Image: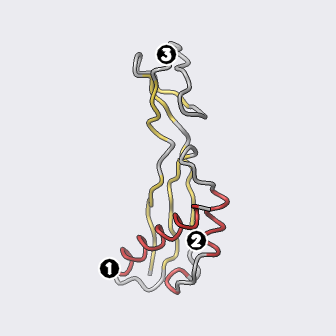
Amino acid sequence: MHELSIAMQIIETVEENALSRKATVIREVELEIGELSGVEFDALNFAFEHAPANPLFKNAVFKIIPIKPLAQCLDCLNEFETGHYGNPCPKCQSVSTELIKGNELRIKSFSYD
């Protein structure tokens, strides 16, 4: 389960930033995760629940904001929602498309005391 290593890296990154701001407790961590990122949301939530105990995160809420995949046609520049990599453009049927949104994984914000 690679979600555990992802969860640990997120916790480590937030912890470093929170401690530099003299935080004593993390209340919430917001994550933006693309639906085509390869991350299983339920598995990531499970990993957060079972990650090694860190007092800074004792009651922290990890909020996942799913990002819908968006592609762009490289021929006609049409942007369209997609559910897969490599879908043809619905406007001109070109297969020359690229995913421009939906495979990200980023820490959007965190709140602390």
Marks 3/2: CA–CA distance:
43 Å
The amino acid type of the residue labelled 3 equals Ser
Question: Is tag 2's residue or tag 1's residue first in the polypeptide sequence?
Answer: 1
Give residue 65's quadrant in the image: bottom right
Label placed on residue 94: 3
Percent position (x, y) of residue 59?
59, 80
Q: Residue at x 58, y 53 (%)?
A: 39
Judge left or right: residue 70 versus residue 22.
Answer: right
In which quadrant of the rendered view does residue 12 lie? bottom left
Q: Quadrant of the C terminus?
A: bottom left
Q: Nearer the viewer, residue 104 or 110?
A: 104
Q: Amino acid at mark 1?
A: Ser
Name the mark nearer the viewer: 3 or 1.
3
Q: Which residue is mark 2?
A: 61
Q: Which residue is painted at 47% across and 40% down in the image?
A: 101
Tag 3's secondary structure?
loop
State yes or no: discs 3 and 1 in contact (Cβ < 8 Å).
Answer: no
Instruction: Give the residue displayed 50% in from the left and 54% down from the top.
Output: 32
CA distance for labels 2 and 1? 20 Å
The mark found on residue 20 in the picture is 1
